[in-house]
Amino acid sequence: MPAVDPVERRLHCERMAELSWAGRDPNDPNGAPAVARARSPQAPADSPYWLGKADPDGTLTEDERLRRAEKLRAAHMKEMTRRSLVVRRRRKAALAGGEGA
């Protein structure tokens, strides 16, 4: 396995955690304490896009739908941050490689 930058690894792990939390039931007795710790003080991702992604069938309660939408949005933002990091790193490498030629 190739060496991975610690920042990129952290972003990947955070994104995967968000996706994992997006699919969990907060009423599960084994996961309730972890869910309580994972809640963030930010406003919920209440746009129709994220709500539709979180509950395409419309079967979840409003609280659960908002919670899952928030996690999906957070995972998406982490992925965008990771992609930006990769692009900036490639551009920097290309500029550094071009100067020596």
Image: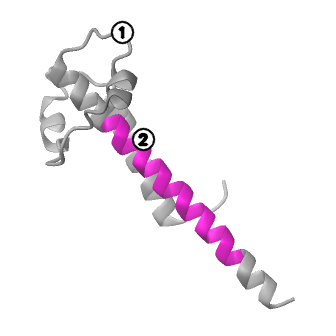
Mark nearer the N terminus (1 vs 2): 2
Say whether residue 4 is visible: no
Asked if 19 appears above or below 79 in the picture, the reply is: above
Residue at horizontal 30%, vertical 11%?
58
Asked if 60 appears above or below 74 in the picture, the reply is: above
- Say what secondary structure mark 2 lies in: helix
Task: Tell me which segment is drawn in magenta.
Answer: 71-93
Residue farthest to the bottom, as pictured: 100
Amino acid type assigned to the residue bearing label 2 in the image: Met
Residue farthest to the front, as pictured: 48
Quadrant housing residue 19: top left
Residue farthest to the right, as pictured: 101
Question: Which residue is the site of mark 2?
Answer: 16
| Residue 40 horizontal side relative to residue 71, left or right | left
Q: Quadrant of the C terminus?
A: bottom right
State how far apart marks 1 and 2 are (Cα).
Answer: 23 Å
Residue at horizontal 67%, vertical 72%?
91
Say whether residue 40 is visible: yes
Asked if 47 appears above or below 39 in the picture, the reply is: above
Measured from the top left, where is residue 30 in percent x and y?
18, 25
Which mark lies nearer to you, 1 or 2?
1
